[in-house]
Image (spheres, rainbow, N blue to C red):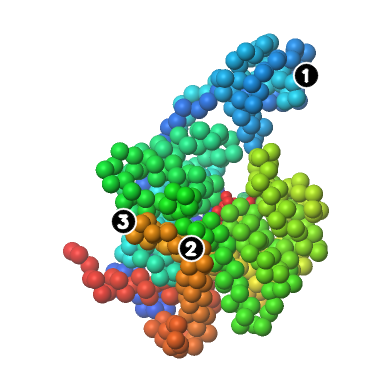
């Protein structure tokens, strides 16, 4: 089967099968279907940067070959910037006043080990921005820096954004993009330069009313600040352009509540699911995959509601504690400790290390995948011992995984509603930027809760074929006369809202 993580072809086509299934159910206009089945634009370009010199640790074999080497006295050792891959960026000031000995470009730094000097130089990276659809508003979607980024992946994620912005009822379209890079292997300065080059090349296709990036895997508010600076630099009315990116720091035009928003939206969905079933979140057992922005915030919010986070898995390890992990301590271990360069849960002293395989089999009520796509495969779905999978990540469940979950009666809250909190608060940030306003966190959360719960209810009504008008929502225009699975129901809601634009506005010829 094709892979969402980009190592095989054809994933986009597979992901679009759900689109076509829902389009058939609503009898979608054929011209509208054609407009939506491929992206408006696929931008593929290259960015180059000048990389810094590095110190690369010798392998065990190389160390034997290097033999004895006098230690070098590097006084400004703090100027050696550690990277998560074990290398050090060699800032030139590190060698000021140093008393060094080298042989065959090898240096012995006390307390750090034997390294080989590696010259930096120009390096080229493949960059993407897929603009899927803009009929409902400017293109909107995250920027991902990841080693497996690919055209197929970004096409899929860009289309997901078109559906998600329609479900969230915000006036944006869908886009996604980023750079094929492993950010752990580069310094902050190199990432900054790469980001500036990305915007330098893409500037003519971006703007607060054209295409609005946001953080995704491997990027954050700092990177959004670089993007905003590069985009607005030298512009006459640069304050009016702050809405060119969202997910910024609150001190430079970001919104209160944006950092937490995706995790918060996930929890609002889970609360609705629990309320309908009379299920108590207090004491509920939760397993979470991914402890980055989304996973860690969902964990904090859920644990404040009394849930127990019993296991967390990430790219570098898994921790488990049957009585519930101390979430604040885990957040500190991952995000508050500068020595934890890979920002991983591995090594957390407040839990036991278990294998990824065992993680999926931990006895729990809720499973929150908040890492990458395609993690809940058929065999993983067979192992899960939970009642609900709340898809915080984009595309975490494979087709086969879906079939197994359905057969095992494990419920799913699909990604396009479950993680829509991020883009919803991005819209609030954009609105605040346009109005030069600053809202409180409680104002942001009040609006977010209303928006998520209302659209969650409409999707539930579509799935159960229960058209109704209440004081807060009206699902009558969206129900299709028969029950559907909840993923198809979410897609129906998106497609009906998008189709209305084409049908009411018509096509320019
Ligand atoms: P992040 O970069 O902050 O964190 C990613 C996490 O996933 C890390 O803990 C990492 O270790 C883990 N991970 C990576 N590869 C893994 C693997 N092979 N196995 C297990 N864990 C792995 O990213 P994020 O912003 O938290 O995004 C997480 C997911 O949520 C992504 O699918 C993203 O598209 C989706 N999402 C994010 C937002 C947002 O606002 N940030 C909004 C909507 C959806």
Q: Relative to 206, does residue 126 appear above or below in the rendering?
A: above
Q: How many marks?
A: 3
Label 3: few (<14), some (14–19) or many (≥20) C-alpha neighbours in 10 Å: some
Q: Residue 440 — which label?
A: 2
Q: Is mark 3 within 8 Å of ligand 1?
A: no
**Residue drawn at (22%, 67%) of the image:** 507
Q: Residue 189 — which label?
A: none
Q: Quadrant of residue 117?
A: top right
Would you say the residues marked 3 and 2 are in contact, meaning their CB atoms lie under 8 Å apart?
Answer: no
Report which residue position mark 1 lands on: 64
Query: In front of the other: label 3 or label 1?
Result: 3
Report which residue position mark 3 lands on: 209
CA–CA distance in space, label 3 to label 2: 25 Å
**Residue 391 image position (x, y, % from top left):** 58, 65
Nearer to us in this view, 81 or 467: 81
Of mark 3 and mark 1, the one earlier in the sequence is 1
**Residue 170 image position (x, y, % from top left):** 39, 67
**Residue 430 image position (x, y, % from top left):** 39, 58
- Judge whether residue 10 can be spotted in this image: no
| Drawn side of residue 182 relative to residue 18, left or right | right
- Judge whether residue 334 can be spotted in this image: yes
Rendering quadrant holding ligand 1:
bottom right
């Amino acid at each position: 089967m094709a892979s969402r993580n980009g190592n095989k072809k054809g994933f986009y086509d597979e992901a679009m099968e759900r689109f076509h299934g829902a389009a058939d159910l609503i009898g979608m206009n054929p011209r509208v279907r054609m407009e939506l089945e491929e992206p408006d634009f696929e931008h593929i370009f290259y960015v180059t940067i000048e990389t810094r010199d590095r110190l690369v640790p010798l392998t065990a074999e190389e160390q034997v070959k290097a033999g004895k080497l006098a230690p070098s006295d590097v006084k400004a050792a703090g100027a050696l910037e550690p990277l998560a891959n074990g290398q050090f960026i060699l800032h030139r000031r590190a060698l000021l006043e140093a008393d060094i000995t080298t042989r065959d470009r090898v240096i012995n730094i006390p307390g750090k080990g034997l390294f080989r000097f590696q010259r930096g130089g120009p390096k080229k990276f493949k960059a993407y921005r897929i603009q899927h659809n803009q009929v409902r508003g400017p293109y909107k979607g995250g920027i991902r820096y990841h080693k497996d980024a690919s055209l197929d992946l970004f096409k899929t994620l860009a289309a997901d954004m078109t559906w998600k912005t329609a479900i969230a009822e915000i006036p944006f379209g869908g886009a996604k993009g980023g750079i094929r890079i492993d950010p752990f292997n580069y310094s902050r300065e190199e990432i900054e330069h790469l980001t500036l080059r990305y915007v330098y090349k893409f500037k003519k296709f971006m703007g607060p009313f054209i295409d609005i990036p946001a953080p995704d895997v491997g990027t954050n508010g700092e990177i959004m600040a670089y993007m905003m600076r590069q985009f607005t630099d030298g512009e006459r009315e640069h304050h009016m352009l702050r809405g060119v990116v969202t997910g910024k720091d609150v001190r430079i035009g970001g919104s209160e509540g944006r950092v937490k928003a995706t995790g918060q939206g996930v929890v609002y969905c889970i609360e609705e699911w629990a309320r309908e079933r009379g299920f108590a979140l207090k004491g509920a057992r939760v397993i979470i995959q991914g402890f980055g922005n989304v996973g860690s915030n969902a964990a904090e919010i859920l644990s404040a509601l009394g849930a127990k986070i019993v296991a967390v898995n990430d790219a570098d390890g898994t921790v488990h504690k049957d009585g519930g992990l101390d979430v604040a301590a885990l957040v500190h271990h991952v995000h508050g400790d500068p020595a934890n360069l890979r920002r991983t849960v591995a090594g957390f002293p407040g839990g036991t290390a278990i294998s990824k395989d065992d993680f999926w089999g931990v006895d729990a009520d809720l499973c929150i995948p908040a890492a990458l796509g395609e993690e809940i495969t058929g065999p993983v779905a067979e192992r899960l011992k939970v009642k609900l999978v709340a898809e915080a990540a984009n595309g975490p469940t494979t087709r086969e995984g879906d079939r197994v979950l359905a057969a095992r009666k494990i419920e799913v809250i699909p990604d396009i509603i479950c993680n829509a909190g991020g883009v919803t608060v991005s819209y609030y940030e954009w609105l605040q930027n346009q109005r030069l306003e600053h809202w409180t966190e409680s104002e942001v959360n009040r609006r977010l809760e209303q928006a998520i719960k209302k659209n969650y209810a409409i999707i539930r009504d579509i799935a159960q074929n229960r058209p109704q008008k209440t004081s807060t929502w009206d699902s009558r225009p969206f129900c299709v006369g028969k029950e559907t699975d909840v993923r198809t129901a979410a897609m129906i809601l998106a497609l009906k809202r998008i189709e209305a634009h084409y049908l009411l506005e018509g096509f320019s010829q």
